[in-house]
Image (cartoon, rainbow, N blue to C red):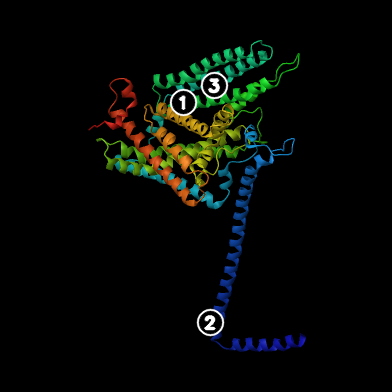
C-alpha cells in the first residue's frame, strides 16, 4: 500500500507539471472547472429536490393518516357485546354523531405550497376582474368609476332583516327551551304522559309555524326585500328550525329514559349550552363539544378578509359575466339554438359561483364562527372534489346538513319502519332536501321556477343510484365534474333569463297559473 502510493505521487506531480507548462491546457482546465461546478450545482439541486419531495410527502402522509384515523374511528369505538360478538349494523346506527378535534381539510391542504398556488390563482383572477371593471368604466364613461350599485341593491333594507332575525332568534332561544323544560319537569309525575306530550307538542308546533314559518315569509314578501336580504331571512329561518328540532330531538328521549329519584329535579340542559349551540357551526345538539384552548385572532382576521373577498368576487362574476349577456335591450323567446348557446356560456360563471359559495360559506363562514366560539370539530365538508360517485358527493359536499338529514331523516325513518325500506328512506330525504332548496330559491329570487328541484329530485336521484360507491375509476370523477358544469350552466342560464323576464314582463294577475308558469317561456320585449 505504502510503496504504491509513494510511487503514484511523483507521477501525478509530473503530469500536472507537464500540463501546466502547456499553454493550451488552460482552456481545457477551465472547461473541466466549469463542468465540475455544473456537476456540483446538479448535485445541490438534486438534494433540494429530494428535501422538497420529502416535505410534501410528509405533509400528505399526515393528512392521509388523519383521514384514515377518522374513517377507522367508528369501528374502534365499537365494543363487543356480552356474548363476545360484534354488534350488527343496526346496532351501530343507534349511536349518534361523535365530535372530535379536527381542522378543516382546506386548512391542512393550504399548508402545501402546490395547493396554495391554486388559491393564489383565484386571487389573481379577482384582480383581473377588478382591473377589467375599471378599464370598461373608463372606456364607457371616460373616468375611473368603481360603483357597487348591484351589491348595495342586493343587501338593501338591512334594518328590516335585523328586526326579523332578532324576533326569530329570541323566539328560538326561549320558547322551545322553556316549553321542553316545562314538559320535562312534569312528565314523570303527570298521569297521562301521552296527553301531556301531545298537548305541549301541538302548542309548540303552532308557535313554530307562526313565528318560524309564516313570519319570515310575510317579512320577505310584504316588505319586498332585495335578493340577498331575502336569502338571509329565509336561510336563517331554516337554520333556526333545524337547530330547535335537533335540541328537542336530542333532549326529549333523554328526559323520558332518565326517571329522576324522589325529591330530585329531572336533569335538563343549561340555557348557556343551548345558546352556544344556536351559534356554533353544527346542527346536531350536544351539551358540550370539544373546544380549543384559545382564539387565533390572526386566523379570524384572515377569514373575514376572505369572506369580503368572496363577496366582491361574486359581484364581479355577476357584473362581468352574467348581467351583460342576459340584460339585453331586446329579447326573443328561446329557440333550441339560443338555449344551448346560453347554457354553455353560463357554465363558467356557474361553476365559479358554485366554488365561491362552497369556499365562502362552508369553509370561511363556518370556520369563522368555529374559531370565535373555539369549536374544535371543523369537519364541515370532506374531499367532495375527488368523488367518483354522486352518492359520495352528496355525503361530502356539506357534512353539516348531511349529518342532520342522516340522523333525523334517514335514520329515524329506518327506526320507525323497523329498518326496512332503505330505498324509500333515501328517496324521502332527497325529496325533502330538494323541496327545501327550491323553497329557499323561490323566496330568495321572488319567483317560482323549479329548476333546482328537477335537477336535485330527478337527475340527482338517478345519478345517486347509477353512479354509486362501486364506481371507483377516475373516469367517473370526470363525469361527475362534467355533470356539475352542465347543471350549474343550466341553473345560471334559466334563473337569469327568468329574472329579467319578471322585470320586463310582470304578471298582470295573481292567479295560480300566473305564479307557477315561468315568464321567460312567453316573454318577448323590445
The quarter of the picture where residue 269 lies is: top right
Q: Position of residue 200 (x, y in %)?
A: 58, 14
Q: Earlier in the sequence, mark 3 or mark 2?
A: 2
Q: Earlier in the sequence, mark 3 or mark 1?
A: 3
The quarter of the picture where residue 217 lies is: top left
Q: Position of residue 272 (x, y in %)?
A: 64, 23
> Element type at marker 2?
helix
How far separated are the C-alphas under marks 3 and 1? 13 Å
Q: Is residue 494 left or right of residue 416?
A: left
Q: Which residue is mark 3?
A: 169
Q: Position of residue 177 (x, y in %)?
A: 61, 19
Q: Residues within 10 Å of mark 2 (few under 14, many from 20)?
A: few
Residue at the spot x=31%, y=43% of the render? 340
Foreground disc of the pair 2, 1: 1
Q: Which residue is mark 1?
A: 234
Q: Residue furthest left?
A: 526
Foreground disc of the pair 3, 1: 1
Mark 3 touches mark 2? (CB < 8 Å): no
Residue at the spot x=59%, y=46% of the render? 108
Q: Residue furthest top?
A: 191
Q: Which residue is mark 2?
A: 27
Q: Residues within 10 Å of mark 1 (few under 14, many from 20)?
A: many
In this rendering, the count of numbered labels is 3
> Element type at marker 1?
helix
> Element type at marker 3?
helix
Is residue 181 in view from this perspective? yes
Q: Looking at the picture, does residue 108 appear above or below residue 508?
A: below
Is residue 228 in view from this perspective? no
How far separated are the C-alphas under marks 2 and 1? 81 Å
Q: Is residue 218 left or right of residue 401?
A: left
Amino acid at each position: 500500500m505504502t510503496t504504491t502510493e509513494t510511487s503514484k505521487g511523483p507521477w501525478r506531480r509530473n503530469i500536472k507539471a507537464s500540463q501546466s507548462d502547456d499553454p493550451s491546457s488552460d482552456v481545457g482546465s477551465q472547461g473541466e472547472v466549469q463542468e465540475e461546478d455544473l456537476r456540483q450545482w446538479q448535485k445541490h439541486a438534486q438534494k433540494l429536490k429530494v428535501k422538497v419531495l420529502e416535505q410534501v410527502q410528509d405533509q400528505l402522509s399526515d393528512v392521509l393518516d388523519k383521514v384514515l384515523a377518522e374513517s377507522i374511528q367508528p369501528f374502534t369505538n365499537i365494543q363487543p357485546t356480552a356474548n363476545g360478538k360484534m354488534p350488527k349494523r343496526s346496532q351501530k346506527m343507534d349511536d349518534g354523531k361523535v365530535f372530535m378535534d379536527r381542522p378543516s381539510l382546506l386548512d391542512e391542504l393550504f399548508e402545501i405550497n402546490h395547493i396554495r398556488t391554486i388559491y393564489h390563482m383565484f386571487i389573481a383572477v379577482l384582480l383581473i376582474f377588478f382591473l377589467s371593471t375599471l378599464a370598461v368604466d373608463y372606456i364607457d364613461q371616460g373616468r375611473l368609476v368603481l360603483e357597487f350599485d348591484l351589491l348595495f341593491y342586493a343587501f338593501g333594507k338591512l334594518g328590516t332583516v335585523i328586526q326579523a332575525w332578532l324576533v326569530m332568534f329570541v323566539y328560538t332561544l326561549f320558547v322551545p327551551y322553556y316549553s321542553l323544560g316545562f314538559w320535562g319537569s312534569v312528565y314523570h309525575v303527570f298521569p297521562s304522559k301521552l296527553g301531556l306530550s301531545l298537548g305541549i307538542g301541538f302548542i309548540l308546533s303552532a308557535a313554530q309555524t307562526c313565528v318560524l314559518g309564516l313570519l319570515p315569509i310575510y317579512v320577505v314578501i310584504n316588505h319586498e326585500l332585495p335578493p340577498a336580504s331575502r336569502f338571509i331571512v329565509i336561510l336563517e329561518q331554516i337554520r333556526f328550525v333545524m337547530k330547535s328540532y335537533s335540541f328537542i330531538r336530542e333532549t326529549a328521549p333523554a328526559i323520558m329514559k332518565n326517571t329522576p329519584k324522589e325529591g330530585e329535579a329531572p336533569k335538563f340542559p343549561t340555557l348557556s349550552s343551548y345558546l352556544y349551540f344556536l351559534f356554533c357551526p353544527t346542527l346536531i345538539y350536544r351539551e358540550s363539544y370539544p373546544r380549543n384552548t384559545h382564539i387565533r385572532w390572526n386566523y379570524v382576521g384572515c377569514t373575514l378578509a376572505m369572506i369580503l373577498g368572496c363577496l366582491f368576487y361574486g359581484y364581479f362574476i355577476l357584473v362581468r359575466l352574467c348581467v351583460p349577456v342576459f340584460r339585453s335591450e331586446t329579447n326573443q323567446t328561446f329557440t333550441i339554438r339560443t338555449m344551448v348557446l346560453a347554457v354553455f356560456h353560463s357554465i363558467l360563471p356557474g361553476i365559479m359561483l358554485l366554488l365561491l359559495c362552497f369556499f365562502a360559506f362552508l369553509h370561511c363562514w363556518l370556520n369563522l364562527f368555529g374559531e370565535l366560539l373555539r369549536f374544535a370539530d371543523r369537519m364541515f365538508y370532506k374531499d367532495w372534489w375527488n368523488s367518483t360517485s354522486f352518492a359520495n358527493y352528496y355525503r361530502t359536499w356539506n357534512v353539516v346538513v348531511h349529518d342532520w338529514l342522516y340522523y333525523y331523516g334517514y335514520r329515524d325513518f329506518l327506526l320507525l319502519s323497523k329498518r326496512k325500506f332503505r330505498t324509500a328512506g333515501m328517496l324521502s330525504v332527497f325529496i325533502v332536501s330538494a323541496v327545501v332548496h327550491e323553497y329557499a330559491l323561490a323566496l330568495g329570487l321572488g319567483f317560482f321556477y323549479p329548476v333546482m328541484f328537477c335537477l336535485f329530485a330527478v337527475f340527482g336521484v338517478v345519478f345517486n343510484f347509477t353512479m354509486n360507491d362501486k364506481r371507483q375509476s377516475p373516469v367517473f370523477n370526470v363525469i361527475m365534474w362534467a355533470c356539475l358544469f352542465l347543471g350549474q350552466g343550466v341553473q345560471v342560464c334559466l334563473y337569469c333569463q327568468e329574472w329579467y323576464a319578471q322585470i320586463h314582463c310582470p304578471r298582470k294577475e295573481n292567479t295560480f297559473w300566473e305564479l307557477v308558469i315561468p315568464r321567460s317561456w312567453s316573454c318577448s320585449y323590445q
